[in-house]
Amino acid sequence: MAASAEARLAEGLEALGLSPAPAARLLAYRDLLARWNRVYNLSAIRDPEAMVERHLLDSLAVIPHLPAGPLLDVGSGGGLPGLPIAIMAPGRPITLLESNGKKARFLRQAVLELDLAQVSVAHERLEQHTGGPYGVVICRAFSEALAFWRGTARLLAPGGRALAMKGRRDEMELAALSTEGVSCRVQRLAVPGLDAERHLLVLGDSGPEHRTAS
């Protein structure tokens, strides 16, 4: 018999070294996302059970690698990774940036229903956004890494980082960053319960370019 969503989430949080306390709110967000997804097409993942690993734990795997300070989630869509991070880190100011009106409407409703007072929603395109400065700007399946860096570097606080969540390591993408002179650290991510490659590109890192952390 397959383990329940509650059990899988609890095990995943433990594996990531995160508190199990917000598990109920994470599942409430999952349920809200699944309900709105039927009409608003917020995610290609239609099965709420699959959302535990592919959305919740996938988003939360980046938490140990987040710099301090306010966070901007670019192209937030259904609130990923920004809303799971906000649930786990209620003290961190978070802005969800989304240009699509229907998705921005969902984000505002989710922030309201989940009582996330530290989260704001910006319904605009990246090039229009003038908020910040941010300690971290993050995206998940938003754009090619170099385009992401070009659009977000201006929004970073001194010492801030731009983080791009990726699947497989793409050497052409890394080469484009190198040609532009953008430093990048590649961090492997292990997502509990997900048998797929995940990497985090940490842009603006001052260390050796393209080094991979295990």
Image (cartoon, rainbow, N blue to C red):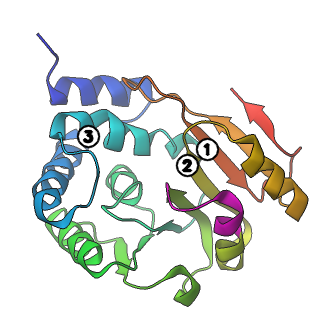
Up the image or down, 20 lies above or below 68; here it is above
Tell me, yes or no, whether the two marked residues, 1 and 2, touch with CB atoms within 8 Å: yes
The kind of secondary structure element at disc 2 is strand
Dot 1 or dot 2, earlier in sequence: 2
Would you name the residue on which mark 2 appears?
A: 165
Could you say where residue 55 lies in the image, as x and y percent from the top left? Answer: 33, 44
**Cα distance, mark 3 to mark 2?**
17 Å
* Residue segment shown in magenta: 141-149
Q: Nearer the viewer, residue 110 or 104?
A: 104
Q: Which mark is residue 200?
A: 1
Could you say where residue 160 lies in the image, as x and y percent from the top left? Answer: 70, 65
Q: Is residue 131 left or right of residue 18?
A: right
Instruction: Name which quarter of the figure residue 57 lies in.
Output: top left
Residue drawn at (15%, 51%), measured in percent from left and top? 34
Q: Is residue 20 visible?
A: no
- The amino acid type of the residue labelled 2 equals Met
Mark 3 nearby-residue class (10 Å; few <14, some 14–19, many ≥20): many
- The amino acid type of the residue labelled 1 equals Leu
Residue drawn at (30%, 61%), measured in percent from left and top? 78
Would you name the residue on which mark 3 appears?
A: 51
Q: Does the magenta segment cover residue 143?
A: yes
- The amino acid type of the residue labelled 3 equals Met
